[in-house]
Amino acid sequence: QVQLVESGGGLVQPGGSLTLSCAASGSIFSVEYVAWHRQAPGKQRELVASQSGNGGGLVYYGDFVKGRFSINTDNAKNTVNLQMNNLEPEDTAVYYCNVNIRGSNFWGQGTQVTVSS
């Protein structure tokens, strides 16, 4: 079993930055990909960023990211981070960490990000 715990969310002003962290524990091997998703009120969950393998693989970002976010993994600490810069009010959402291990998806409980002045 795999457990994922997100942290780092909060309230930030437009143009500000946040770093989300996802700490993974349990049977973490044969990782297919790691990813961050988000869900705003009244909207469907959408993919923010993903990286294949256990870090160092192919990276994908949603079109709305526009170079503002960066996903990275720290294998020594079993964490997946999402660095977010130049945040906009439209980035307000609950952000979820997702890890796929041999075809099985695992999710964290989510962390709230609110961008507001």
Image: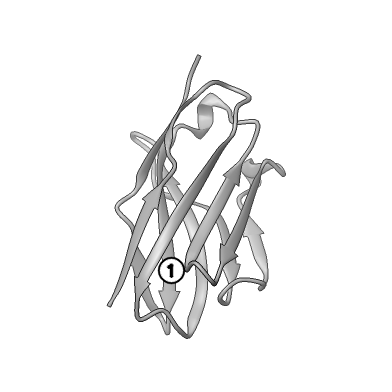
Crowding around mark 1 (Cα neighbors within 10 Å: few <14, some 14 to 19, many 20+) is many
Q: Residue furthest right?
A: 67
Q: In front: 40, or 32? A: 32
Image colouring: one colour
Instruction: Please identify the quarter of the rendering in which residue 61 is found.
Output: bottom right
Looking at the figure, which quarter contains the N terminus?
Answer: bottom left
Position of residue 91 measured from the top left corner of the image (x, y, whole percent):
51, 34
Q: Residue at x 54, y 21 (%)?
A: 13
66 up-or-down from 57: above or below: above
Question: Callout 1: helix, strand or loop?
Answer: strand
Position of residue 36 measured from the top left corner of the image (x, y, whole percent):
49, 55
Name the amino acid type tagged 1: Val
43 up-or-down from 87: above or below: below
Apparent side of residue 81 relative to residue 107 in the rendered image (left or right): right
**Which residue is identified by label 1?**
99
Position of residue 103 measured from the top left corner of the image (x, y, whole percent):
41, 81
Q: In front: 3, or 50? A: 3
Position of residue 104 measured from the top left corner of the image (x, y, whole percent):
36, 78
- Label total for image: 1
Apparent side of residue 86 relative to residue 44 in the rendered image (left or right): right
Instruction: Please identify the quarter of the rendering in which residue 57 is found.
Output: bottom right
Q: Residue furthest front?
A: 76
Apparent side of residue 60 relative to residue 19 in the rendered image (left or right): right
Q: Residue at x 34, y 48 (%)?
A: 110
Q: Residue at x 34, y 34 (%)?
A: 41
Q: Residue at x 48, y 19 (%)?
A: 116
